[in-house]
Image: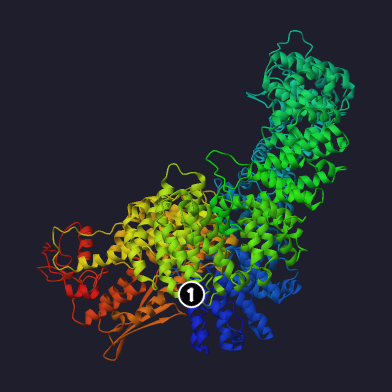
Amino acid sequence: MNPFNSAATLGTNGFEVSLNYFTGIPDINTLSDPNLKKNFRSLLKKDDTTKEKALREILNSSDVRIFEDYTAAVAWVQIYPKLSIDLSRNVRLLAHQLQTKIVHTLGKKYSRFLPDTIGAWIIGTYDTERVVSSQVRTEFLSCFNEEKFESLFTIFQVPLLNFVNQLLNSETQNSLSNEQQVSKDEALLKFNRAVTSSTQMFQRALQLPNHSEESVELIDKITDSHSPLWDNFSSKDLNIRRHTLQTVPLLLSYSENLLKPLTKAVFKSCRKINKKQALLNSTIVLPTLNALHRLVVQSNNFWTLSKNSQDYFIDFVSLGSCNCDPIYYRLLSEIITSSDDSFISLENDAFFTTITDIIYRSISKERQSNSIVVGWIIFLDIILKFKVPEELIIKKVTPFIVSLLNKSKLDSAIVKKTSHFFVALPSDELLLTINDLVLDSLVGKKIIFGEEPLNAELFLNNYFNVLASEPDSLSECLRMLCSNALNSLEDEELDLEEKPTNSLVLVEGIISHNFTEYSNEVEGFLFGLLAFLDVSFVKEPLKTLTLYSESQLFDDRVLHEVINDFFVKLEDVNDNLLISYFLKKIPQIKHFDIAKCPNLVSFTLKKSGQSFTENDSAVIFKLLTKDVLKNLYNQALDSSKHWEGFIANCCSQYQNDLFLKFVLEEPQFLVNLWKRFSSSKDLLNLIEINNNTDPNFIVEFKQSLLSFLLQASFEDSKNVPEILAHILKAENGPEMLALPDKRLITNLANGVKFGSYQTILSNPLQHNVALFKIDDVHNGESLRSIYSISAVISYILFLLKNKLVAEKVHIKVLAVLTEAVVDHTFLSPDPEAYLVDLHSNSVNYILGLTKDLTTEDVLNVISDANTESVLSSLLKEAEKNIFVARIATRILSNKLQYSKPAMFTLSFLNDLYKRGLPILSIVLISLPQEVLFSTELDRFRNQIASYLVGIQNSKEILSSGLPHLTLLNNFTLLEEETISNTVEIIEANRSMMVLQSFSKLLECDIAYDQGFIPMRIQMLIYLHNCISKKLINSDGLAPTYEVLSNLVRDSLGVVSMELESATATELTKGMSIALAYFTFRSLILLQKSSQVNSDIWMSEKETIITEFLAVVKVFDFKVENLCTELVLNFTEQVLIDIVPDSSLNEEIDFFYEQLETSFSLLMLKVTTQVLYKVLLNNHQNFVIEMELQKMSVKADEDTQKLKPELPPLLIQLITTPFEEYIEFESPEVVARYLFGWYLVLLHFRNVTYDIRKSYLGQIEDFLSGFLSFVFWQIDFEHDKSFYQHLKSNTQVNRPMIFEKLSSDLPMDVQFKTFTVYLYYTALELLGSSCKHWFMDIKNRQLKSTIEEVTKTLISPILINSELDAVDRRLKSSEILTKDENLKVKTNRQQHDVKSQYTIDEQTMEMTIRLPDTYPLTNVMVEGLHRIGVKEQQWRAWLNSCQRVISSSNGTIIEALELFNKNVNYHFSGFEECAVCYSILHLDSSLPSQSCHTCNNKFHSGCLYKWFKSSGTSTCPLCRSTFNFSRRKLDTERSREQF
């Protein structure tokens, strides 16, 4: 006999199929396929994950035709029903998917087994988890269409009912689940889910039109009096109860004989409801009520079939609807009105009292408006159906009606129903009661019902609407209410402090319903209201006036007289807030015309000159005058918001005469319209269209446009093209655009100066700027705004392109301004892209003017200064204006690029020389290399060089030497990629004479003057080019190198001195920066060429580096621009590649200071790289010294021991993350924090266990904060573009922020990418600490994001890095290769490392496997084969390996070395620690502490942990007191380890 009462079977093919866990178990041994056998064995296990994996493997196999095999099919048929009700959702889903796939694939071959599994399959469509039921139904429909699916219930009604019968009558929670494998709660959950689903399937079976005899028999079993089905009506599981209650109508339709048991079961359900679970009860209230309704329909005296049924019913309905569907009230009404019982009767007074209270309470608790409406409508209907005394109705219903009218604004359906209710009552007593309540409180009194005051406005509105809904039937009460309200103000004894708010509400009702018969009374009432106006009574009368203006009672005279008197009364009250409120509301009154209110007109005229709100201005604009307009205009200038309102009001109230006069008298008005063009264009259109022929207006218009251009801001300058295009569209646009040229040019010429020598680094003339005058712009001297310059450029360019002006005059101005913009963008910290585009457009336009000129034409223009052309005009101006010279250079470089040497005779060049060196330099810098280095120019080049040899005194150095050296440098600009052999630009002897001249120049009396700096720059350019571009023969190379080294050394001193000088001007500072650039460049060249001239370099290197560091310490890197960036790039190169670590280490405090205080992002980057270089070297030396200290046999007690300590400043930088997002925080703050972590983390590279542990203790309080900071700053879930950027374009294991390629990315993207790199580094070096942080995260969504990002971006790189490190170590390390019995292999596909140790032809084997989310998930250390080692010791070794990686931030290599050392030492006879059973500790120490009693050995670290945990200093084994003695360290072991 089955102890679980599970004797039935689902099988129809001669083998047992069941739902329980102990019968119908498939015989796995009969399966022939080994994989299938393995998977079915997994399906019989208790672990859900194992079952899921097995089902997935079967599903993912190429073909399920393996189930054509009978034994395989039988095995599946037996196990499927058990899986279909499994506790795991995924198991159920996968089982149903596999069933679908089998049926779909095998088709008719599976049909014999379908009756056995159809119940298990269809029950999936009724699964309580919607994701399962919906997916199973979808899969069903993939095998059968909708019609066939429905027919399955008819075809397989017997198997389906058998399934239900088996589950309800034969199974229990103990038979479905093994209590040894799952908890009671889990078993109950599984059973309840199965019962719920089977009950729904039972409902569907009951709906079938015909039932076979077998089906009837099964239904009878299910509904047998002893069946658990009846207990399910009162089940504690509300899902089971709800679906069981839903079977009542179906069971009654099936058999009337079930009326009595169903009645008892339903009332038992009513009795067993927990009233404290209102929210949960909402799921069963409606099914229960529906069951009662079906019972009363079946038999209206069914109450008699169960004891105390009426009491249970009252208890049940006292729960209320629990906010379920509004149909609740309809069902309840039908139950009440259809019953035939002595208690449940429409004539029972007690029942009336009870049920009305219950329904009222239920409606009062409703949350949905629809339920409230339906509830009240049905409630009123129920009341009318009762046949109880009228006095009782009045007594009970009056509070309900008052409460209804006082709740909220009534829905129109309730209003209509309530009015019908009043009409249907046998008398007006209820209505008159409410009417009296209202009439007693019209003026100054509260409406009180019982003891509580009502919401008068709400109550009166609702009551009036109810009466007005039936004006004919309820006319008497309505008339009485209206008359009393309108006459309520006529009592002379009224206290004006008592406000007629209740009367006002009723009068508003009269107005809203357009009761025109009361027009005169309403007029009198409105004027009567004025007497009551005060601070507390303004809003209500205004609301009434608004309603009056929109109604059929409206009279224009009455409205404006009342409003005017209203305002007069408010002025008497003298409350500014009330007046502002009045001004805001009056415009909203329909038909309002302020001109009809004289007192209000006077007020607005006065008000326009004072401060007022934006909303008030809309009223004031209706009485606009010039003075009012001026006041409004001045106030609108304060904010863009006020301005937009001002423009909108100007356009809506535009009066041309008024605005024209205002424009002529207020010159700045049009300028401000231009400045706010986007919001002002509509008003500008109106002014221009109406006045474009007025000469006075045109003059003022031009003047305003000029003023606008000269006052332009950045935004203004960007809008200029749009503004000009707007003007040009006007009827006489060209005339309005024509401005006085002389005035414009004069204003600009005085404002634009060439005042920065730094631009030598970036302009078409290059070094030739030395030939032009440079203005010394002193501090505080303001130049013309770059934005006004850009505005004028746009203006001139617009005029030229549209052929509105003569070209030559304007092109000169355009040339000056365009090149001034270039200088601004070069020297600006944040150059605007708009200015770059503007310069490009201007240059392209000027180049386009000369596009038709041939090379010969250009040479003719150069030769003949008197020709009339654009180019000739520019060349004349270029002799005295460097900006024009730069534009001329751009033109000539374009036109002379294909010129030939024969075109440039000596006489041609000499003529240019006589004309002036500036013009000559423009031509030379524009020539192609083929011409510059041609033999035709040999004589001219030597002629220029001769001027350098013949310098006699200091005066000639700058007057003759500087310009001629500048010209000579044009012949050194050879492109390096074209260099193959040495190219001598001048004769060798003359070249040596030039070098000798340079040596003398460096010793002259003005060599260290500020004026000599340009000469130094030209000498640096010449010497640098001669060496780097092979312009001097081998004999001259050494002297050139020596002169250059002396020049670099002295120039560094000059730069340092000038930058420190307190008297330095902007001009000399600019020269010093330019000198620094060329000096640093030459310094790098000296180092690159040091192999050729090593003696000279070694003799000067120390001095040069000292001078260089002095320059770095005084250089101002705060000004970030392209010039500073160029200098800083060379600075970085010298610091990293040339300056030795020892020198940098001496200046480390300076670099720390820069890291802490610098506001230059470029400097922070350089400083960080320098510190990285220094700290890395110091760190490596420190690690060696620490190991040497450990190796010392007997340390000197007087010697100070080294301690691993991180630099305090770095700790300070990483202590607290900044609080803003990277996008909104200043770059230097972001950089300091991130660079601090970058430098801190380098200390964890290549360190020992002890050092790593010490460092970690210093930052562990901040590490978790940093890791959380990473995922707070970067929203990987929503910032898909950045995440994709990381996945596709970025290597997260490189600090790309320091690479030049990254500079093209936005700064916030660079910082975020670097943040991810730091996260990668933290995982790489501190994996176990990061893992602990990850495991402590409670936010599941965040945790999932971190896991996915790490798995995608970080883990693959770290895993490969670990495996690469193992492979590299295998080739180099003695530890892993010296023992021929030891083999270590890496497996890239499995991400594991296998260590094999062979002993007497037997293998000891251990594997370390890295998970996909390494290191956030523990590595798996598995001992595959153990030989000659006790199990306890073997486990200890494996656990030690695990701890190295998972708890100590160690690497796989360290874990492997620890394991293999343990193996070696074990078989070499070493004794293990008696605590951890390992020979080697994590810190690689041997057991060195012995107990004198038991002689067991221990690691010092293990003893320390034991003493700390036990609180005593006794031996862990024998418990005797442990005596320590100083022991000699094993120096040989230490040296070997090191």
* Image coords of residue 1340 (percent x, y): 50, 58
Q: Nearer the viewer, residue 74 or 1090?
A: 1090
Please name the amino acid that badge 1 sits on: Thr
Q: Answer above or below: position of 827 versus 495.
A: below
**Horizontal side, residue 131 vs residue 1217: left or right:** right
Q: Is residue 1332 in sight in this rendering? A: no
Image position of 1449 with respect to 15: above or below: above
Give the side of residue 1201 with respect to residue 912, left or right. left
Q: How many marks?
A: 1
Q: Badge 1 local density, few (<14 within 10 Å), some, or many (20+)?
A: some
Q: Residue 422, how many percent across, how many down?
A: 79, 31
Q: Residue furthest top?
A: 493
Q: Residue 554: x percent and y percent?
A: 87, 24
Q: Which residue is mark 1?
A: 50
Q: Is residue 1480 above or below residue 321?
A: below
For the point 55% across and 63% down, the residue is: 944
Q: Residue at x 34, y 75 (%)?
A: 1453
Pick the residue in front: 186 or 1328. Answer: 1328
- Element type at mark 1: helix
Is residue 340 or residue 1119 the one in the foreground? 1119
986 left or right of 1215 in image = right
Q: Which residue is drawn at the image coordinates 37% and 62% (left, top)?
A: 1139
